[in-house]
Image: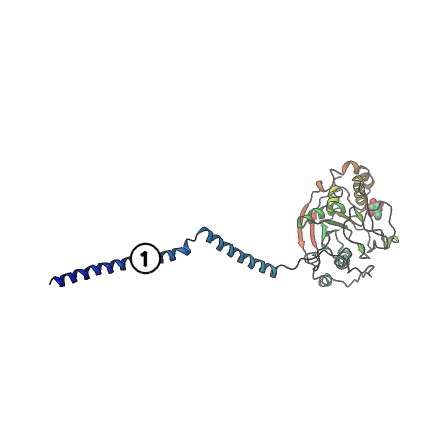
Amino acid sequence: MGYCSSIRKISRKSKYVILLILVLSLLAWIAIFSRDMVKPIYPTTQQTHVKEESQRKEVDLQIEAANEINTPPQKTKCPQVSPLLLGAVKLSFESSLKLKDVEKDNEEVNEGEYKPSDCTARQSVAILIPHRNRERHLLYLLHHLHPFLQRQQLHYAIYVIQQAGDVTFNRAKLLNIGYLEALKDYNWDCFIFHDVDLVPENDHNLYVCDTQPKHLVVGRNATGYRLRYKGYFGGVTALSRDQFFKVNGFSNAYWGWGGEDDDLRIRVELQKMKIVRPPKNVARYTMVFHKRDSGNEVNRDRMRLLGRTPQSWRKDGLNSCSYKTLSVERMPLYVNVTVDIGKRLS
Ligand code: BGC
């Protein structure tokens, strides 16, 4: 009996011991398991940095790879002398020419603007053409000018500034407006002030700006290719954005034909700038024949106006050019800006 009860006591004790071992091992297992679970959620600061760093590197590599695919290779500057120049070209003035034909020949021109595809142009140039009722002349000019400017590897856009209504024409004011309106589109480096009836004959006559204002028409067919007079500054001129701004643009006071180009020369000279010209064998133009337009009669007041330019240029020009823009149409080959410029105040 005594033997049996001591055996029962021992087995009860061992049961407690086994139970205790079980409980302890359960607790130990829970402790290990919970540590493993928590580890990825609350890593140490050092672990976080390592992981973020490697993720960032991976993202950077992906962005770099995507950029390599999307970015075209950097274009180099176009050469100083374009390899596309032809020199003197034969001009044609076919009466059968249509705007559609010229558009088809210049499919790379978009809303009057063009950029060379294989190099970065050395200058961005806005061509400004004052206009009213000279559609045929405009067509001939566009036909020759677009390929001419493309051969010169320029970034350019052509703006035609139309005077609305039939009051006396004001070429100079339209050119001021062209300058102001074109600058709303792009910060052009250079402006070419271009008569609609003059077509350049030689593509070495570069439509870019110089360190000084440039006069591009040394000679034209109608006058035996000779400069009309020493100070002649009409027809086609090139002034940089800053040069034109410095002289306060053209005067707005010249209504009808003549004088406004002489006025601009005086402004240039007052600023101690010097007019430059390309060689005469290059600066040649064909003038498309036309009769004097009605609404553009000779300005008989021009000599009086020229006399007061040294006093008036600061107040009469870009800074006083008031007008109403009636429309800006982005045609395939040019931007057509139609404006109401008011009339001569007599
Ligand atoms: C006029 C200019 C014109 C030049 C050439 C001058 O008498 O004042 O505006 O460009 O003649 O025709």
Whether residue 320 is situated above or below residue 284 in the rendered picture: above
**Which residue reaches farthest left?**
1
- The residue under the point 49% across, 54% down is 50
- The residue under the point 76% across, 37% down is 312
**Which residue reaches farthest front?**
3
Question: Identity of the amino acid at label 1?
Answer: Ala
Query: Which residue is at the front of the view, 161 or 86?
Result: 86
- Labels in figure, total: 1
Q: Position of residue 13 (x, y in %)?
A: 20, 59
Which residue is identified by label 1? 28
Q: Quadrant of the C terminus?
A: top right
Q: Quadrant of the N terminus?
A: bottom left
Residue 298 makes an appearance in the image: no
Q: Position of residue 8 (x, y in %)?
A: 16, 62
Query: Which residue is at the front of the view, 146 or 17?
Result: 17
Could you say which quadrant of the image residue 246 lies in?
Answer: top right
Disc 1 secondary structure class: helix
Q: Position of residue 329 (x, y in %)?
A: 67, 54
The structure's colour scheme is: rainbow
Whether residue 164 is situated above or below residue 309 in the rendered picture: below
Position of residue 22 in the picture relative to residue 302 (left or right): left
Q: Position of residue 95 (x, y in %)?
A: 79, 62
Residue 327 makes an appearance in the image: yes
Query: Which residue is at the front of the view, 283 or 65?
Result: 65
Whether residue 41 is situated above or below residue 320 in the rendered picture: below
Position of residue 317 in the picture relative to residue 12 (left or right): right
